[in-house]
Amino acid sequence: MNKTAQAEDMLHDYAVEIGAASINGAVILPGSGVTIKSTAAALFKRIAPTESLFIRGNAVMGIIENNGASAIEVISPAAARSRFESYATLLAYRSGRDGKPVLKPAVLAQEMATALLESEEARTFLPTITGLINCPVIVSTDDGAQIVGRGYHSGTGLFITGGQIPLKVELSDAVRALEDLVCEYVFQSPGDRSRALASFITPALKLGGHLHSNVPADVAEADKSQSGKTYRQRLVAAVYNETASLVTCRSGGVGSVDESLNTQLIAGRPFIQLDNFRGKFDSPHIEALLTAEKSFPARVPHCREVMIDPSRFFVMLTSNGVETTRDFANRGSIVRNRKRDGYKFLQYPEGDLLEHIRGCQSYYLGAVFAIIREWIDQGRPRSNETRHDFREWAQTLDWIVQNILGEGPLMEGHQDAQERVSNPSLTFLRNLALAVAEQDRLGESLIASELYEIALSAEVGIPGLFEPDQDKGKLLIGSIMGRLFKANDCLTLDGFTVTRDETETERHSGGGTYIAKLYQFKRGAD
């Protein structure tokens, strides 16, 4: 027997004797005494320290580049065949001299790749990933706060894909920096301004593990298009060196809102923006995401269901007048602003405010961290605010905006906004008031038929009316107004006062008189 054959026999005897799945740096595939379990353990023990494959829910995931940004992707059995080869030489027993098994290089079969990916050993040895973020994160330690940078962070499960560790910003400078981000907006109320400021701080608190319970969706609403509502949410993402992933409004089937949302959830980027939604917004799937505690199922066509960590995502929605369910309204932080017609916004050396933030991103992130450090140094206090379902978030941010930023109460005016967006009649009245203002008819006494014409020309949907019909339209408007003004002849909402009067009017047919209802819209409180 020559030396090569002796070596092969010795290698075989050693491997079979101890049931080894690895030897001399190679991983031995199942067969001839080597089990799937032992191969999986040898392979994933080798992969784990590289922090390049992870477990997310029940699936093995990897990080890929997607249109210039990193994304999390489920590793398919086909892709795993070549991926595994990059971590170790794969060997398998083959028939050798005299029929004895010897170790030779092998190609992983797709069926075996599936078995390895679905093994318990993959979930045992690979690190768990919860999401991606493109900037450092401030986390709590026994000594206070620590900033962690690029790479995988086991404490949060986040993979930090980029960004520089920000320099320390003085607290007074940090407060001014955040105020500058919203100084050119005209908000509906001081509470809306406070909630806008809170939107810049919330992601850092949640990503760093300072908030343990759920955070609300950021619902941006304005009186007109091109008012900066979407822009503000882009500013928030830019502070974190991110770009919001868009989910567009589609109804059902392939490409629906839920399917598009699931695609973004699996990709793992933290900011998800549902842009410019109109009419009725009703998605139990998104409502469930906002209240899920530990895991949430996401599935797209041709991909297995993945359980994701919902706490690593920040849902944003923009609208000029959306109608939501009460459940969604209770899960949102509504920020209302008005368009500044003819206003010329500030320009910076980098361009507009968004480009300025991107150019100075590390400074603005440092400003957010300075505010969080102050909150930690103060003992992580909370206020007694109880006007939001997400109590921990509301009380923490209420304390911060009032005591560090010097702003008004976080929830001021919010319950009225929640009631309005979840009430079809109030949503209609608000949209109608905007149309009356747009058509320069504020202060006029208007009857139901005139309100119908205003709504029709402004494309304001009338609840219950599915096609133009003046007779039916004015009857529906009269019915809606009757319910709204049942207890009071004066209503205020979103910067408008609407009053109802009655007048005795001659019938056109000459058959006597009737009581006509007249409605008058004004800006501001009566």
Image: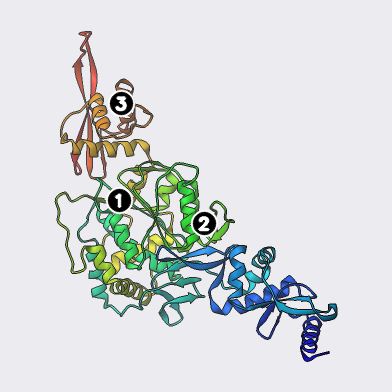
Tag 1, which secondary structure? loop
Residue 117 seen:
yes
The quadrant of the picture occupied by the C terminus is top left
Tag 3, which secondary structure? helix
Tag in front: 3 or 1 = 3
Amino acid type of the residue tagged 1 in the rendering: Gly
Task: Tell me where residue 166 appears, x and y as whole percent.
Answer: 33, 77
Between residue 288 and residue 330, name the one nearer to us. 288
- C-alpha separation, residue under disc 3 versus residue under disc 2: 41 Å
> Which residue matches tag 1?
413
Q: Residues within 10 Å of mark 3 (few under 14, many from 20)?
A: some
Q: Earlier in the sequence, mark 1 or mark 2?
A: 2
Q: Which mark is residue 152?
A: none
Task: Tell me where residue 368 appears, x and y as whole percent.
Answer: 32, 71
> Which residue matches tag 2?
292
Task: Tell me where residue 280 appears, x and y as whole percent.
Answer: 40, 40
Amino acid type of the residue tagged 2 in the rendering: Ala
> Which residue matches tag 3?
478
Q: Is residue 100 above or below residue 6?
A: above
- C-alpha separation, residue under disc 3 versus residue under disc 1: 28 Å
Tell me the quarter of the picture where residue 237 sits: bottom left
